[in-house]
Image: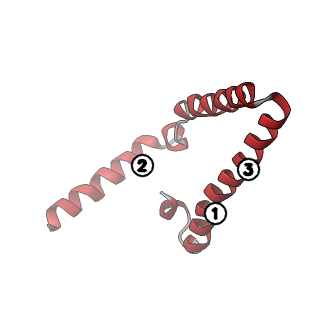
Amino acid sequence: MVAQYFKRRREFVEIFIVSGSGLGISAMSLIIRTTIGALGWRLGLQVVTGAVSVTFILGTFYRSASLYHPQRRAILHIKNQKRKIKDKSK
């Protein structure tokens, strides 16, 4: 997916994206420690679970911007033509 949008600096963008998961894990450990310290272990973990659940539910509503592109039909036609050319060359 990344290679479709970034042609020249693809390696840099991939490194940035992969490092994001590590930063997220570090941030979650701090958030969990803070909420457990402030609210107690039971309520703190319930708050963290609620936040993760809301994030997951909102993520299911994400739709790619290509679905709303003004020239969506033309883009899909070009993709289908490329696929047909690949199939013929095999």
Where 46 falls versus 4 (above or below)?
A: above
Find out whether the residues at labels 3 and 1 contact each other: C-beta distance under 8 Å: no
Q: Residue at x 71, y 48 (%)?
A: 29
Which numbered disc covers residue 27? Answer: 3
User: x, y percentage for residue 33?
Assistant: 77, 43
Q: What secondary structure is marked by label 1?
A: helix
Count of number-bearing discs:
3
Q: Residues within 10 Å of mark 1 (few under 14, many from 20)?
A: few
Amino acid, disc 3: Ala
Tell me the CA gap for discs 2 and 3. Answer: 39 Å
Locate the C terminus by quadrant: bottom left
Answer left or right for 72 relative to 80: right
Work out whether residue 17 or residue 82 is closer to the camera in this orientation and state it.
Answer: 17
Work out whether residue 56 or residue 70 is closer to the camera in this orientation and state it.
Answer: 56
Where 25 falls versus 44 (above or below)?
A: below
- Where is mark 1, residue-wise? 19
Q: What secondary structure is marked by label 2?
A: helix
Amino acid, disc 1: Ser
Which mark sits nearer the N-terminus, 3 or 1? 1
Which mark sits nearer the N-terminus, 2 or 1? 1
- Where is mark 2, residue-wise? 75
Answer left or right for 35 relative to 90: right
Looking at the rendered image, the disc whose residue lies closer to the viewer, 3 or 1, is 3
Q: Residues within 10 Å of mark 3 (few under 14, many from 20)?
A: few
Looking at the rendered image, the disc whose residue lies closer to the viewer, 2 or 1, is 1
User: x, y percentage for residue 50?
Assistant: 66, 26
Answer left or right for 50 relative to 71: right
Q: What secondary structure is marked by label 3?
A: helix
